Amino acid sequence: MNAPQLLVLPGSLRQGSYAHALARHAAARATQLGFGAATVFDLRALQLPIYDGDLEAEQGVPAAVQQLQDAIQAHQALLIVTPEYNSYPPPLLFNSLDWLSRLSENRTAMKPTALMSSSPGQYGGLRALNQLRLFVQGNFQMLVQPQQFALGRADQAFDAQGQLQDARAEKAVDGVLQALAALTNQLAR
Ligand SMILES: Cc1cc2nc3c(=O)[nH]c(=O)nc-3n(C[C@H](O)[C@H](O)[C@H](O)COP(=O)(O)O)c2cc1C
């Protein structure tokens, strides 16, 4: 198999989001660590309405959901980077994935997946990370690897160029990506 391609999904709507900064950093590192390419997919751009059963009954699943499905199918591995809102992943992630679950075919089953989180708090969104693991494993059958990373003090973590400033954080991100590349290659054999 050619080197696998990685799809990175940051879960924030915010301009200046730390989850987006971590996602961009991870995508740049991924191509040095066993991935042939890495795409950061902007869930904001889909402009999905809040899931509403009446809307679905009247208009069906929004066409933009298919873009997410197609992107997942076109990449061999997934990295989801979540912020933390009140101990949980934010509405953007749940809403996008809830809509995705309304498509008839599940393209996420057994997809090698890694999770990261970021927060200005000291735990880096670890609680949201663990909730996200349950959500995507249980409902989407993603194959979520044990290696994960929560970036604490995310508001101080990046320099003006968007580079992580802490060598330990850099190493942790690299470790997660290397494990994901290895898992993806192993499954492709
Ligand atoms: C509604 C709300 C709830 C939040 N709850 C938490 C929380 O439980 N833990 C935490 O570490 N940060 C919490 N935060 C702070 C976020 O981590 C912070 O706003 C962060 O910048 C959001 O991620 P982003 O930078 O990727 O947009 C919360 C923020 C908001 C707006």
Image (cartoon, rainbow, N blue to C red):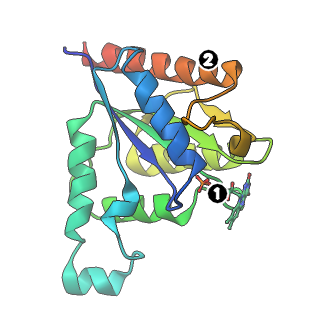
Q: Can you identify the residue that label 1 sits on?
A: 88
Tell me if residue 8 comes above or below residue 101 in the rendering: above
Give the residue type that dot 1 points to: Tyr
Q: Name the residue at 63% across, 36% down.
A: 158
Q: Residue at x 49, y 62 (%)?
A: 13
Asked if 118 appears above or below 49 in the picture, the reply is above
Q: Earlier in the sequence, mark 1 or mark 2?
A: 1
User: Secondary structure beneath disc 2?
Assistant: helix
**View extreme (right): residue:** 122
Q: Nearer the viewer, mark 1 or mark 2?
A: 2
- Is disc 1 surrounded by few (<14), some (14 to 19) or many (20+) residues within 10 Å? some
- Dividing the picture into quadrants, the one containing residue 113 is top left
Q: For residue 72, say whether it is visible.
A: yes
Q: Nearer the viewer, residue 11 or 189?
A: 11
From the image, tell me which residue sits under label 2: 171
Quarter occupied by the C terminus: top left
Q: State ligand 1's quadrant.
A: bottom right
Q: What is the x, y in percent for residue 116?
A: 57, 37
Is the C-beta of the residue carrying label 1 under 8 Å from the nearest atom of ligand 1? yes
* Residue 18 locus on image (x, y percent): 59, 47
Q: Mark 1: which secondary structure?
A: loop
98 left or right of 64 in image: right
Q: To which quarter of the image does residue 188 belong?
A: top left
- Please say whether residue 124 is visible from this viewpoint: no
**Residue at x-position 42% and y-position 15%:** 33
